[in-house]
Amino acid sequence: MPFDREVANLLRSVLQRPAKGSLFSDIVARVTNWEEAIESARFHGILPMLYSRLEADTIAVPAGAMALAKREVERNTFHCMANAAELLEILRLFDRVSIPAMPFKGVVLASAAYGDIAKRPAGDLDLLIYRRDLNRATSILQERGYELKTTVLADGSPAEKDNFEFHFERELDGAVIELRWRLELTQPRFRQDLGMEWVWPRRSTAELVGAQVPNLDPVSTLLVLCMHGSKHGWTRMIWVCDVSKLLESQPQLDWDFAISEAKRVGLWRSLALGVLLARRSSAAAVPAEVLQKLEGDRSARRLADFLYERLPAEPGQMPGGLLPYNVQLLGFKDRLRMLLSPTFLRPNERDRALVKLPRVLEPLYYVIRPFRLLKDRTGR
């Protein structure tokens, strides 16, 4: 079913600064499919902000729609509070045995950039730790009732070679924790091992429900947000909003360092794409000279134009071009590193699923893989 144009306009308006006069009221008045509006806002992670705008402006919205939105927002608020309490306890337990841990995204980002932990979806708890602490951290989480869902080998390492994350779930309350020891942009991984060695030395702190917790410094936060959004094709509006809110909360951001660090670790185009999307969606404040540099990257500008036009109605649609999306994110040198790396050239299950070959002909998958990648716009 085609996406309702008025719903799309409503969702776009949530990311924009509150308009003067009756502009927002006019947008709301034209919405007729409120069930789709609320479900789409929930999917895109912006329902708490939409509800706040509707409630603050006392705009006439069908009572049933407001009641539905209120229930979802109250549920999210409860989960955010539960996540905050659980995070504080886990950090306390880790600290007691000298395990440094860096929370990222989630309630810490909501508190630091949005000023309210309930303004973002609750989601999972994401923690970055040193690889050397993985076994001890796993034991602590298991003692708290979490079950490790990631398949591991006898030595405790992930069975999947390119996995840098342990996924935990707790049946009692449905809590989910992701323990990571490396952040990455695309597959195969290349150039930099971005982990605690990258973020911990220049860490800052954030206030979370009255307590001080470790937090990424502003530049690292910006790069992680742009990395994460780019990795997932910016399919949810909340990821664009995260960048906008961070820039709004950090007017003194060190842009020279942000740009140089992005280039150093291979995230320049991800940075440019994330900031350009935030600029187009919410008029995020970006210094003129910085904006000129970002707009000067034709690939980033083209990707930003493509993705902006398809949010919120067509999330997940990949841009065209000879190269897959994840390769388009890279500069020329990094493209060569990726395309020539053994991991990128090695066939995987997606290649084998395309064509079933007998064992004796399996070397032909090395020929099939490049053509399959050109067809698959995600580049996976």
Image (spheres, rainbow, N blue to C red):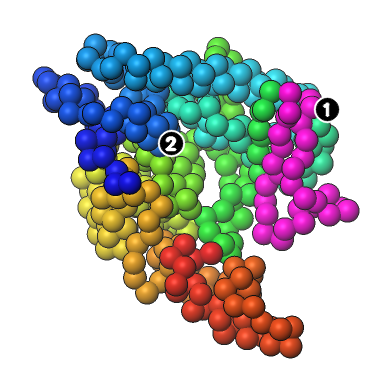
* Relative side of 159 to 325, left or right: right
| Left or right for 81, reference 20 | right
Measured as percent of width and height from the top left, residue 248 is found at 32, 30
Which tag, 1 or 2, sits closer to the chain's start?
2
Q: Secondary structure at mark 2?
A: helix
Task: Pick whichever, 197 or 83, lies toward us.
Answer: 83
Q: What is the C-alpha distance between the residues marked 1 and 2?
A: 33 Å
Q: Percent x, y for residue 206?
A: 52, 23
Residue at coordinates 27% horizontally, 63% vertically from top-left? Answer: 298
Q: Residue at x 59, y 68 (%)?
A: 350
Q: Is residue 158 magenta?
A: yes
Residue indicated by mark 1: 143
| Main SS of residues in magenta | loop
Q: Viewed as shown, does residue 126 lie left or right of 321? A: right
Residue farthest right in this picture: 154
Label 1 CA crowd tier, 10 Å (few <14, some 14–19, many 20+): few
Which segment is the magenta one?
143-172
Up the image or down, 29 lies above or below 166; here it is above
Q: Which residue is mark 2?
A: 43
